Image (tube, grey):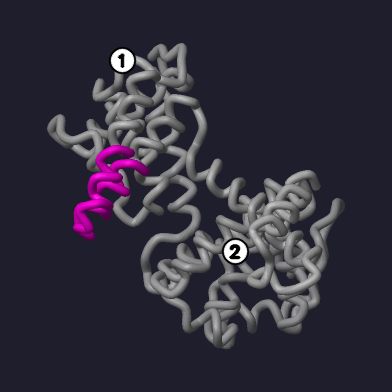
Amino acid sequence: MAEVVRLDPPGASGLDPALRERLDAAPCLFVVGAGPVLIEMLERDGLSVQPLGEGPLPEGCLILDFGQGGALDDLVYVIDRLLGPGGCPWDREQTHESLKRHLLEEAYEVLDAIDSGSAERLLEELGDLLLQPLMHAQMESLTGGFNIEDVARAIAEKLVRRHPHVFGDAEAATATEVLANWDRIKQQEKGEQPGSILAGVPTGMASLLRAYEVSKRAARSGFEWPAFEAVWDKLREEEQELREALISGDRGRIEDEVGDLLFTAVNIARWAKVEPEEALRKMLNRFTQRFQQMERRAERPLRDLSAEEWDRLWETAKAG
């Protein structure tokens, strides 16, 4: 009779030595719930394994059960091995702090892939981005903390709690109502007294993104202009104040007024239902492409061109 051995998940240091002895002594070894990557790694460890088929099994066989299996389990196992004893020296040196910049870089590369319109490139970049939370979770798991299952479980439970209009009997007919419910439920979950709606905006966000989020939340609480034209009036007001600050030469005042002008521009974007970060990113992509086109077409260094030559090159680049 075959014996089933459940492993969930395989350890970072490989199989337990006592279990390894049993596996080596078994007349045959089958696996269930293991993807091709995991099977390949078991074979590299010297185990002769095969997928479990139909029909009776020889006496004394062992069946390794890795649960549901699949590509995600394979990836978790790969990262487990990279971070575990005998794994990759670079990966094992990483910390939550050292990986922060990689998370941002991968997120921006996903944005570039979306802009490119290439599904193949998007698939690759999403994989690179997926690696980041898995690395953080596995680093915690190795020190006795949470693992990726805990992360997945927590976000699934949160989504259910904060969508009572989908999973419960609440009603929310518009996106605005959904966001209002989300804020209310979030506040209840954290046991907070009604406080600042801006308290949850991360201070570490890119400033343009943070400005947009602050603007949206303030508007949801009722701090809003009565009409779009009033926002334009505010922009003209901030422009005049910046001009006065520039005349004064006061650097602190100039900085303040530039910030006020930029924040008002963010509000114009919000009223126009445009995300300013996305709009600026795309504009910078266009500018970069056109400027590089100018560099290629110029017959001498750009710094040596006249204003008229600059204009001609720019208009040609804009035309494509």
Q: Is residue 159 visible?
A: yes
- The residue drawn where x is 73% and y is 66% is 295
Query: Does residue 116 lie above or below 60 as drawn?
Result: above
Coordinates of residue 61 in the picture (x, y in percent):
75, 68
| Residue at numbered disc 2 | 76
Residue 71 in magenta?
A: no
Query: Does residue 26 lie above or below 232 as drawn?
Result: below
Closer to the camera in the image, 270 or 201: 270
Mark before the other along the chain sequence, 2 or 1: 2
- The residue drawn where x is 25% and y is 21% is 222
- The residue drawn where x is 72% and y is 59% is 309
Closer to the camera in the image, 93 or 152: 93
Q: Residue furthest left?
A: 193
- The residue drawn where x is 41% and y is 67% is 140
Which quarter shows the N terminus?
A: bottom right
Coordinates of residue 225 in the picture (x, y in percent):
30, 20
Residue 244 in magenta?
A: yes
Q: Main structural element of the magenta stretch: helix, strand or loop? A: helix
Give the residues drawn in magenta, as a range. 239-262
Q: Which mark is residue 79?
A: none
Query: Does residue 11 lie above or below 149 as drawn?
Result: below
Q: Amino acid at mark 2?
A: Val
Mark 2–mark 1 contact, CB under 8 Å?
no
| Residue at numbered disc 1 | 226
Coordinates of residue 65 in the picture (x, y in percent):
65, 59
Between circles 2 and 1, the one closer to the viewer is: 1
Q: Residues within 10 Å of mark 1 (few under 14, many from 20)?
A: few
